[in-house]
Amino acid sequence: MNKHVKNLAPETTDLSRRSFLVGTAATGLVLGYAGSGIDQALAAPAPANFEPSVWYSIAPDGLVTVTCGKADMGQHVASTMAQIVAEELGANWKDMRVQLASNDPKFNDPVLGAQITGGSWSTMMNFDAMSRAGAAGRIALTEAAAASMGVPAGELVVRDSKISHAKSKKSMSFAEVVKSGKATKTFTADDLKAIKLKTPDQYTMIGVSVPQLDIPSKTNGTAKYGIDVMVPGMVHGALVTPPVRYGATVKSVDDSAAKKLPGFIKAVTLDDKTTTTTGWVVAVANTYAQAKKAAAALKISYDGGPNAKLSSESLLTEAKRLQGLDDSGQFFVKDGDPKAAFGSAAKVLEAEYTTNINIHAPMEPMNATAEFKGDILHIYSGNQFATRSGAIAAGAAGIDPKFVVMHQMWLGGGFGRRLDADMMVPAVQAAKAVGKPVKVIYTRENDMTMDFSRPLTYQKVKAGMDGDGKIVAMSHDVVSAWPTARWGIPDFLTPSVDKKGPLDSFTVNGADFFYTVPNHYVRAIKNEMAHNATPSGQLRSVAPGWTFWAVESMIDEIAHATGKDPAQLRISLLDGKGKNDGGAQRLRNTLLAAMGLAGYGTKQLPKGEGMGVACVSSQERATASWTACVAHVAVAPSGEVTVKKLTVATDVGTQVNPDGIRAQVEGAALWGMSLALFEKATLKDGGIEQTNFDSYTPLRMSQLPEVAVNVIANGEKATGVGEPAVTVVAPAIGNAVFNAVGARVRGLPITAEAVKAAMKA
């Protein structure tokens, strides 16, 4: 699927309503930019700088500034990009700096594609291009130094920002070469492609845990997040959101009480042609505190719309109905003939698996500041999808996207939430209404109840085994809202194998596993009711967060039903036959590594304790990271589950920064545990019931288990690490619970009540 991202080239469009919806093949994605002369902050670098690539420049003082076209939300991807450049460039790490890209079209690289951060794609998709950019700079600097020193370029060595000639003992620093003005070599796409890059045995920077470049500014307070933005003349907006998540409209607004409050300017009812929001009102005042008081004073009446009576139960009932229809959905995988294989199978198992609505809740709530400077709209916000967000902002303003300049900020957490641009809509429309720059900051309640959440899902899996217990067939139906289809971007959808039209593969990725099963169907079914009532987004781990919950739980159920060890069954299924060649072997190796590190099968555990395994190929088959987990749990008679230890092994191919990878894997594993045991949002009367952390309860520090991580770096192509460990933990915990007390729980989160009920069943 990542190949689709490269096709999202910017293009101008007419000003019709459809151009703002970012929703048809004709309009495509729009990334506007009105030119470098608009704002001094976005002016081109001084001529004295040397720019070997659009992605970095070298100043006359020798400092190398790398521009990161990805959102940095604490995963240090900007530093990762700088480290990749520094390796091939030959720069000293102390000379490296980072900055975040604007939406200037020059940053829509034909190789790297749209400015989107998600899917654990950033390192794997950028490693080669950034390496070649670094190498190009080294070559250009070397040739310029050779000309200055009068020596052959082939005899020069580049290391620690210095170019040296051993025979003559001459040397020049990067700064000296740049000052000379002789570094002028440019590279075509073919030139870049022809560069011979270093092999892993030649690395001196890749694989080293250098300090992350963004940490000093984030610890001394100089790093600017969206919530920190201040512009001259700025006022503030506070949201009043409807009791229904989506579909409500404002019937009337009584602002008489708000008018009596100091600082109140105006109440703005959103008219959002992009349909990102419905039924929202913004109270605008001189300060944020005044805006919040004014918002509380507004008396608003609503038409709740078509979703006002819906609940989580409604969505689940509809999902089950859709799954029961033979002609619903489209096929994502259609190998062999499962129906015939089930008919001759010695044993058939069926199970239903569910997950509930989950909320992102990043610590920095959604925010945006909008400022009109003449015809130009400036947006200051942290976002994960600049290519789409610029079009949303333009649509909210009713202007051509080329007149939108986006200022990317550091993100105080994203996790997929900032792939959406809803925070820009109230800021833009409020700024337009009052004629002043407006900053809008969501309250935690706004953020939770209006989140583009992980969808409620229902899955039915059926497996057939022969007389020897070998799996001969599996069918897997996945019913959910379709988050990616909601974006209306055709290039992000996948043609169904049954030719019934495109499907949202980001709801079924992972179900196309690397186990050898000769007869295998996977059906993706869109729950239109959930799609409309709970417009869903991508939460860290995306589809594999629920598909592997079902797959890896069912594999365990098959193992126990056929008298096999669950880990050994997986090893036998990961034989690498056919289309699974290569991938299956790497996944099997991570499973063996996790088992060895955890001591799986070698320990006599106390009563009520158990170990469970799971192994996954998140995110997609084409961009997989091979990850396995062994969870060690203790289950109390009350059903309460305590996770004692998580052991995670992951094959990352090439590791750029080992400390950064370990932090990512640890954080992902803990998020996976949080989703597995604690997090649940519910829909009632069309609205999300949980409004803050008292009712939506993620993992707390006091509940942290021991986490052991084994990173396998084998010199293969770099893979992503931000999300895979999220997906593997829940099934490992569920399987461990069964091994501890014989209770099979098939719904997330795994609550004490559910475990106790399963123990009695």
Image: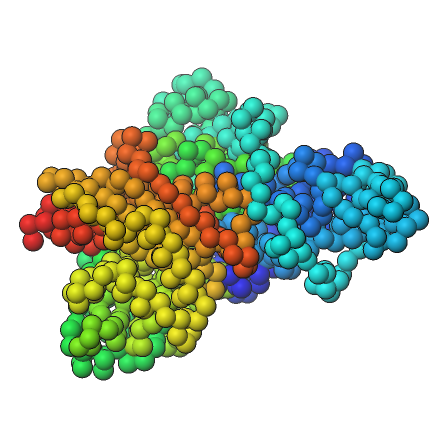
Vertical position of residue 226 compared to residue 653: above or below: above
Vertical position of residue 25 compared to residue 212: above or below: below
Q: Which residue is nearer to you in this view: 580 or 262?
A: 580
Which residue is at 27% across, 65% downward? 569
Q: Is residue 642 left or right of residue 131?
A: left
Q: Which residue is nearer to you in this view: 16 or 388?
A: 388
Dividing the picture into quarters, in which one does residue 8 lie?
bottom right
Taking the image as drawn, is residue 602 in sight? yes
Q: Which residue lies most toward the right here?
A: 150
Residue 528 in the image, given as x and y percentages of width and height: 31, 60
Which residue is at 52% across, 56% downward? 714
Residue 583 in the image, given as x and y percentages of width and height: 43, 65
Dividing the picture into quarters, in which one does residue 163 lie?
top right
Structure colour scheme? rainbow
Which residue is at 87% across, 47% downward? 167
Dividing the picture into quarters, in which one does residue 576 lie?
bottom left
Residue 500 in the image, given as x and y percentages of width and height: 37, 75
Which residue is at 71% across, 48% downward? 89
Residue 632 in the image, given as x and y percentages of width and height: 26, 45
Taking the image as drawn, is residue 532 in sight? no
Q: Is residue 353 left or right of residue 401?
A: left
Number of marks: 0
Q: Which residue is nearer to you in this view: 535 or 91?
A: 91
Q: Is residue 242 left or right of residue 712?
A: left
Q: Is residue 459 left or right of residue 84?
A: left
